[in-house]
Amino acid sequence: MDVRLAAYAVSVESGRVLLAHAVKPDGERVWTLPGGRVEDGEDPFDTVIREVAEETGLDAVVERLLGVDSRVIPAAERRSPGRPALQNVGIFYQVRTTGGRLRPEPNGDTAESVWTPLSDVPRLVRSSLLDIGLALARTAPPTGHVAPVPVGGLIRH
């Protein structure tokens, strides 16, 4: 099994959430939270700040740890044929933007970043990570854990 450790930013301001429009290797586009893989030796706290800057062009500060999500993507559902199952361990942080300007990620997988009304999220083709992050931000569970989000319909791995 492959394992991926990642950090994600949940930034909600004035009823809007900061989203990144990710382009998957097969060309599919899904809305997700800014964030990504923790580099070797990198602190996830630093990862989330770096990823917000890289993917959106915005500067951010971490306000609090929201929680951790662990999910297994079966081998048959991975986008790369022949790969084993993937365990994605996501660390979610509440962040506040402090400056910068929205822009696409230069030479990256993020086609655009936008502030989206929270009421529009249910109608988006999106990563399950987006639903997990919003649930953590909305409920602030003392355990830092929320129920898994089923994948299907508009919700992708």
Image: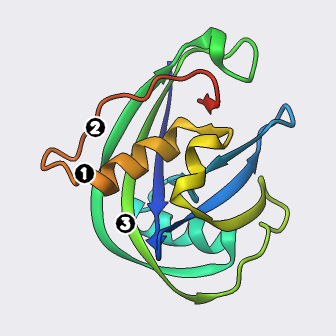
In the rendered image, residue 128, in percent from the top left (x then y), is placed at: 52, 36
In the rendered image, residue 153, in percent from the top left (x then y), is placed at: 63, 23
CA distance separating discs 3 and 2? 15 Å
Q: Amino acid at mark 1?
A: Thr
Regarding mark 2 in the picture, which secondary structure is present there? loop
How packed mark 2 is, by other alpha carbons closer than 10 Å (few <14, some 14-19, many 20 or more), is: some
Q: Residue at coordinates 66% horizontally, 43% vertically from top-left? A: 124
How packed mark 1 is, by other alpha carbons closer than 10 Å (few <14, some 14-19, many 20 or more), is: few
Residue annotated with mark 3: 94
Q: Furthest-left residue in view?
A: 142
Residue annotated with mark 1: 139
Asked whether the residues under the numbered discs 2 and 1 touch, taking CB atoms below 8 Å apart as contact, a structural biologist would say yes
Quadrant in which the C terminus appears: top right
User: Compared with residue 139, is residue 94 higher up or lower down, i.e. above or below?
Assistant: below
User: Compared with residue 149, is residue 55 higher up or lower down, i.e. above or below?
Assistant: below
Q: Identify the image quadrant of residue 25.
A: top right
CA distance separating discs 2 and 1? 9 Å
Q: Amino acid at mark 3?
A: Gln
Residue annotated with mark 2: 146
Q: Left or right: 20 with respect to 133? A: right
Between 112 and 107, the residue placed more toward the observer is 112
